Image: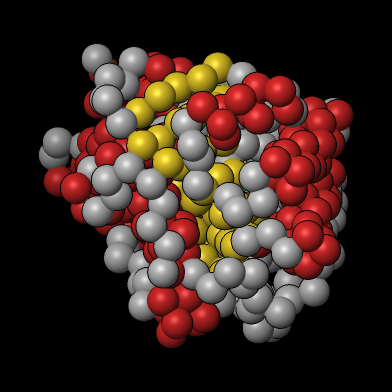
Amino acid sequence: IRHPQNLLITGGCGFIGVNFIHYLLSPESGFTGTIVNIDKLTYAAHSNALVELVNPRYIFIYGDICDSILIKDILYKFNIDTICHFAAESHVDRSINNGYPFIQSNINGTFSLLEIVRQYYPSVHFHHISTDEVFGSLEPSDAAFTELAPYAPNNPYSASKASSDHLVRAYAHTYNLSTTMSHSSNNYGLYQHEEKLIPQTIRRLYDKKPIPLYGDGSNIRDWIHVSDHVRAIWTILCYGNTGENYNIGARNEYSNRELLQILCKLYAELTTPAKNDIKSVYNEYLNLITLVPDRPGHDLRYAIDPSKIEKTLYWYPQIPFEAGLKALIVHQVDSYQK
Ligand code: NAD
Ligand code: TDX
C-alpha cells in the first residue's frame, strides 16, 4: 500500500487531469496531501477549470514536462513522492496531420521525466497513463484486450504512446524504478475537448449542424465515464502492485453509428418539452448524421477486459453509459446557455 502525499500531476489541465484533481480534492478520495500540477496549457487545456482553483493543497505550475531543470526543481521544492503522468498530445486526427508534437511531448516528455527520476529521485513512484490504442485494432469476434495483449499501434498517436509505455517498462526493469501503468478505453465526461466524438456531437446537436461520421460508422469503441477512470487511477496509485499494468474499462462497446443514434435519442428526450414531438425531433437529429471520408488507418475496434483490476483491486465501474451521457448532455447544454 502506498500513501501518496506530495503528488506531481503532469497535464492536469487536460480532460482527464482536471477530473482527477477534482476527485483528489473531494472527500470521496480520502487523499489528504498536496497536488502540484504542471501543464503547458496547449489548445486542449482547460485553463479556467484549474488555474483559478484556490486551495491550499493545490499548486499550478505553467511549464513543459520536457523542461528537465523545472521538473527537477519541482521534485525537490515540493518533496514529491509520486508522479502521475497524464501530459500528452491526445488526438489521433491531429497526429495524422502532424506527428511532431506527439513525438515531442509523448515520447521525449516521458523520457525526460524518467531520466530525472532515475538520476535524482529514484524512490519516487511513477504512474503512467496510457491507452487501449497501443494494442491496435480488434476484429469483432476477438476477445477484449487483457494486460497481456501484444502491442500493435496503428497511428502516430498510439505509436507515441506505445513508445512511452516501453520507456516506462524499460526504466523500471533496468533501473529498478517503482512504476505502475494503466491502459484505459475511450473516456467521456465533463471537460473533454470538443474535437472528440461525444462532445463534438452534443455541440452539433445544439447547433443543429451536420454530425460527421467517419467511414461507414461501423468502427467500435469501448466507453468509460471519466470519473470511473480517475477512481481507478487513484486505486492503482494506492494499492496497485509495483511494476504491474492494469486495464481500465467499463464494457460499453458501441459502433460509432449506434453511439450517435443513442446521443440523438437522449438529446431529443432531454430537450423536447412536448412528449409527442420527441419522435419527430429524434428523426430530425438522425438526419444530421453525415458520412464523411474515413480516418486513414482507422482502427476497427477497441475493447478492454478490466477483470484484473476488478478481481485484484476491487475497482468496478459505477456509471451506466446512458446515465453518464444524459448528465453530460445536460451539463454541456447548460454551459452554452450561460
Ligand atoms: P487532453 O489532450 O485533454 O489533455 C492533455 C493535457 O496535457 C493538456 O492540458 C495539455 O496542455 C497537457 N500537455 C500536453 N503536452 C504537454 C507538455 N509537453 N508539458 C506539459 N503539459 C502538456 O488529454 P486527455 O484526454 O486528458 O488524456 C490524458 C492522458 O490520458 C493522455 O496521456 C492520454 O493518452 C491518456 N488517455 C486518454 C483517453 C481518452 O479517452 N481521452 C483514453 C485513454 C488514455
Ligand atoms: O468527427 C468524428 N467522427 C467520427 O466518426 C470524430 C472526431 C471521430 N469519429 C470516430 C473516430 C473513432 O472511431 O469516432 C471514434 C472516436 O474518435 P475520437 O473521439 O477522436 O477518439 P479515438 O480516436 O477513439 O481516441 C480516443 O480514445 C483513446 C482519445 O482521443 C485518445 O486520446 C485515447 O487514447
Q: Is residue 284 left or right of residue 163?
A: left
Is 47 on the left or on the right of 161, as rendered? left
Say left or right for 308 vs 73. left
x 47%, y 64%: residue: 236
Who is closer to the viewer here, 226 or 53? 53
Front residue (pair 201, 176): 176
Residue 314 seen by the camera: yes
Residue 103 in percent (x, y) is at 83, 36
- Say which residue appears at 42% left-offset and 41% top-offset: 6
Q: Position of residue 4 (x, y in %)?
A: 41, 52
Locate residue 218, reporting x and y percent. 66, 61
Does 159 appear above or below 99?
A: below
Please indicate, yes or no, whether residue 221 appears anywhere in the rendered image.
Answer: no
In the rendered picture of this protein, how many numbered marks are placed on residues?
A: 0
Query: Which residue occupies 24% across, 15% down?
Result: 338
Q: Of 107 and 258, which appears nearest the observer?
A: 107
- Residue at (70, 41) in percent of width and height: 120
Q: Quadrant of the N terminus?
A: bottom left
